[in-house]
Image (tube, coloured by chain):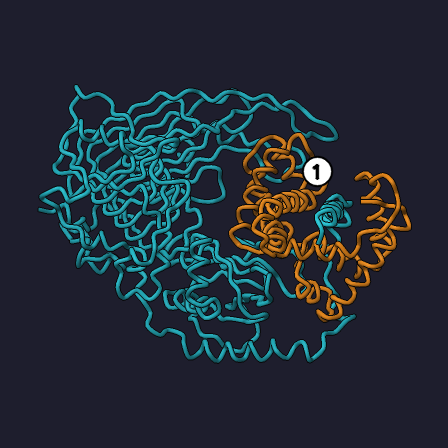
């Protein structure tokens, strides 16, 4: 095509983009009517054959060589970690408070604590390491040592008020809100990790017998904190508006093999002077917000939030909007907000939240309020079990049974999931797995884009709504085998390389929850803790699991 | 079913309102509701997953930057349009590499529609759009969908065929005829590009 022809063609193509939106919407929503125009057998035949074949193949391959879920998520360093007597090559030894303070100067380095560090009153308040602009992206290995007496105190700047207007009835009305876009992060580490995860290559993985090692590739290796104990810390913040706060980190990427003990975290919320939400709080004993927390515990910690009551109860409903503007507060014994927490527990702590004073605390916070307050964590955000934000390609109109992982040719029923797969080239999919834990045992929601074959522009069906529809399930009986089976299904259709690409693109992870809230007066046995690794990571001491690396 | 599903997202007007008030929640919902559409268009035009992802990310940024001042009546159409514009700009950048992709194939096809007129001046955007709308408005619903799915969304012929219940070959022939008719329509209206 000649250059001037191309320019003209581009102009014509551009003109399509300026068409009446109604015309565009109508085209997007158009689907042929299967009643008035029945498909020919010739077109249906390949689909039927493919569906039958796939069911036959899946029946044979299900449950072969099921890898351990725990090994999928726990990284090898946890089980291999033993206290180091000498500083390993490429690492920087941390011996003193000054060494600790110097970590901020090279936030991409590897640091290893070589002895306990105790803060005194003369040391004053410590400044968190890592900010949102310059996060800690290295690895801090506590090496089984403990930091005691840490004090973090900050008085934040109140958020500015923005004057604007919102729709109201047929017109508008003034609406002032607080600009809380500036994030504050408070903890020994303020902000850990990267806004973008670094994908390590499969070659870097030391997991030998793991069937699908790429599932761990997307774990946030950057900004990692491991094997660190913190005792007797005091973390105090006033004028909080947009805050992530925890003893170990405000925003954490990967925290593993760590504990906090007898610490206090106190937050005084900023008193709102405008209508809009002034408070976005993520508050936990270990971390305010965490991507992955593995093998950690919090013992005897107190979390106190004051001044949130009015802010949370003042929910503004804007005319014409079905989503009210409101503050959000997530407070939890381990973390305020979490993507994944596994094999961890909390015990003997207290949460004082004036908003939640008249409510029973749950293991995991309720989701029907602006404040999510829970013994373990306040809010679980997209905990991935099998796949998180994952797209599938596969065969059209293939049905899978999602309970016990056994595919069978039965009609859709109460315990059935329908996953629609579309194999046609150029189309992208559909099945989007997302999982939540509400309490043990785990719950799974299969979030699926799409509907039946007459649906155009499939919408996401999620949450409680998934319970209501006859097409999607909310499976309370899902088990490990099922997850593995689903994983195998993905491999079946995508191939290993294909799934690896999906993993890389969609942050796919595997996770599980085996977390506990321990009663103060009870003693426990190993058998009370499912999936806790008592061989290499934990040991029992006085009726409690403790991290092996801290025991001399 | 369809009606229920729609309730899982806020209405477009509410999302636009959130964006208008600079609420990030608006962007969240816009992404949630139309990421598939944007990705589909971008992927159709650019042909590479990485480029399409990057393009869609740019779309979110552009939506955030342009609402306000814009206040689109249809967020779907707006995001589709922004996606197309950004994808086309990607295509231009890619021109040096001469890599063929869905977008260049579409432009090749649209070259069939270029009117051969003696009009001295190039038609302005509004005139061109009106001519296109009058052409599409006169088509049957099925033909209109075929044209728009192909030249608005850039959808593969196989996808269009599936969605309109026709064979791919039929859609291909239908498109060929429609392009000829469009060229005639533009010529008869004295449109010069």
Percent of width and height locating residue A324: 58, 36
Q: Nearer the viewer, residue A16 or B16?
A: A16
Provide the letter of the chain coloured orange: B
Number of other residues with Cα within 10 Å of mark 1, as a class: few under 14, some 14 to 19, many 20 or more: some
* Residue B25 in the figure: left or right of residue A477: right
Percent of width and height locating residue A384: 41, 54
Percent of width and height locating residue A125: 24, 22
* Residue A330 in the figure: left or right of residue B17: left
Element at label 1: loop
Q: Quadrant of the C terminus of chain B?
A: top right
Q: Quadrant of the N terminus of chain B?
A: bottom right
Q: Nearer the viewer, residue A267 or A101?
A: A101
* Residue A420 in the figure: left or right of residue A455: left
Residue sitting at 26 percent across and 42 percent down?
Answer: A139
- In the rendered image of this protein, which colour is used for chain A? cyan
- Report which quarter residue B90 is drawn in: top right
Number of numbered discs on residues? 1
- For label 1, the residue is B72
Q: Could one spot residue A21 in this view of the protein?
A: no
Residue sitting at 8 percent across and 46 percent down?
Answer: A552
* Residue A405 in the figure: left or right of residue A262: right
Percent of width and height locating residue B159: 66, 63
Q: Could one spot residue A334 in this view of the protein?
A: yes
The chain identifier of the residue carrying mark 1 reads: B
Residue A125, relative to residue B152: is it above or below? above
């Amino acid at each position: 095509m000649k250059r001037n022809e191309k320019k003209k063609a581009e102009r014509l193509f551009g003109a399509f983009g300026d068409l009446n939106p109604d015309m565009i919407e109508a085209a997007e929503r158009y689907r042929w009517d299967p009643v008035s125009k029945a498909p020919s057998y010739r077109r249906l035949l390949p689909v039927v054959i493919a569906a039958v074949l796939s069911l036959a193949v899946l029946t044979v391959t299900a449950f072969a060589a099921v890898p351990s879920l725990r090994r999928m998520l726990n990284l090898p360093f946890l089980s291999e970690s033993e206290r180091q007597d000498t500083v390993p090559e490429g690492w920087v030894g941390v011996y003193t408070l000054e060494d600790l303070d110097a970590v901020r100067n090279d936030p991409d380095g590897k640091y290893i604590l070589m002895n306990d560090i105790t803060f005194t009153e003369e040391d004053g308040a410590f400044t968190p390491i890592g900010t949102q602009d310059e996060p800690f992206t290295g690895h801090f290995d506590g090496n089984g040592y403990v930091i005691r007496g840490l004090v973090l105190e900050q008085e934040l700047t109140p958020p500015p008020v923005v004057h604007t207007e919102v729709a109201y009835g047929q017109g508008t009305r003034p609406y002032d809100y607080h600009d809380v876009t500036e994030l504050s992060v408070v903890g020994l580490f303020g902000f850990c990790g990267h806004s973008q995860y670094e994908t390590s290559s499969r070659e870097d993985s030391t997991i030998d017998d793991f069937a699908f090692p790429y599932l761990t590739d997307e774990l946030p290796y950057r900004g990692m904190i491991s094997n660190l104990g913190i005792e007797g810390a005091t973390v105090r913040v006033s004028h909080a508006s947009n805050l992530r706060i925890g003893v170990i980190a405000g925003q954490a990427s990967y925290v593993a093999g760590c504990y906090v003990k007898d610490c206090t975290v106190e937050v005084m919320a900023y008193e709102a002077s405008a209508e809009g939400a002034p408070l976005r709080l993520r508050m936990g004993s270990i971390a305010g917000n965490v991507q992955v927390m593995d093998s950690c515990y919090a013992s005897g910690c107190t979390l106190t939030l004051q001044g949130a009551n009015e802010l949370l109860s003042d929910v503004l409903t804007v005319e014409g909007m079905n989503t009210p503007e409101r503050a959000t507060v997530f407070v939890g014994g381990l973390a305020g907000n979490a993507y994944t927490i596994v094999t961890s527990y909390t015990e003997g702590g207290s949460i004082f939240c004036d908003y939640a004073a008249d409510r029973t605390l749950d293991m995991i916070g309720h989701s029907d309020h602006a404040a999510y307050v829970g013994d373990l964590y306040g809010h679980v955000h997209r905990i991935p079990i099998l796949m998180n934000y994952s797209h599938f390609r596969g065969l059209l109109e293939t049905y899978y049974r999602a309970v016990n992982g056994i595919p069978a040719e039965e009609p859709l029923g109460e315990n059935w999931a329908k996953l629609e797969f579309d194999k046609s080239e150029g189309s992208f999919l559909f099945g989007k797995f997302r999982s939540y834990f509400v309490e043990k045992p785990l719950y799974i929601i299969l979030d699926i884009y799409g509907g039946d074959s007459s649906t155009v522009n499939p919408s996401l069906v999620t949450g409680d709504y998934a319970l209501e529809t006859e097409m999607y399930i909310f499976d309370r009986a899902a088990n490990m085998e099922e997850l593995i089976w689903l994983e195998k299904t993905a491999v079946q259709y995508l191939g290993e390389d294909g799934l690896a690409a999906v993993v890389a693109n969609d942050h796919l992870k595997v996770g599980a929850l085996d977390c506990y809230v321990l009663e103060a007066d009870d003693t426990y046995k190993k058998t009370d803790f499912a999936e806790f690794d008592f061989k290499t990571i934990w040991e029992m001491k006085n009726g409690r699991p403790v991290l092996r690396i801290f025991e001399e | 079913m369809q009606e229920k599903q729609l309730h899982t997202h806020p209405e477009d007007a509410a999302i636009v309102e959130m964006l208008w008030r600079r609420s990030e929640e608006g962007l969240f919902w816009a992404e949630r509701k139309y990421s598939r559409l944007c990705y589909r268009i971008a992927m159709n035009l650019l042909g590479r997953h990485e480029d399409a992802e990057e393009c869609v990310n740019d779309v979110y940024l552009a939506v955030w930057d342009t609402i306000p001042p814009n206040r689109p009546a249809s967020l779907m159409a707006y995001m589709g349009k922004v996606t197309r514009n950004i994808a086309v700009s990607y295509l231009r950048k890619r021109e040096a590499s001469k890599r063929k992709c869905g977008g260049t194939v579409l432009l090749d096809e649209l070259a069939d529609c270029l009117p051969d007129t003696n009009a001295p001046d190039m038609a302005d955007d509004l005139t061109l759009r009106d001519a296109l709308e009058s052409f599409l408005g006169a088509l049957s619903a099925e033909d209109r969908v075929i044209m728009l799915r192909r030249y608005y969304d850039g959808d593969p012929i196989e996808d269009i065929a599936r969605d309109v219940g026709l064979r791919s070959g039929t859609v291909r022939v239908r498109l060929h005829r429609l392009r000829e008719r469009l060229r005639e329509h533009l010529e008869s209206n004295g449109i010069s590009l």
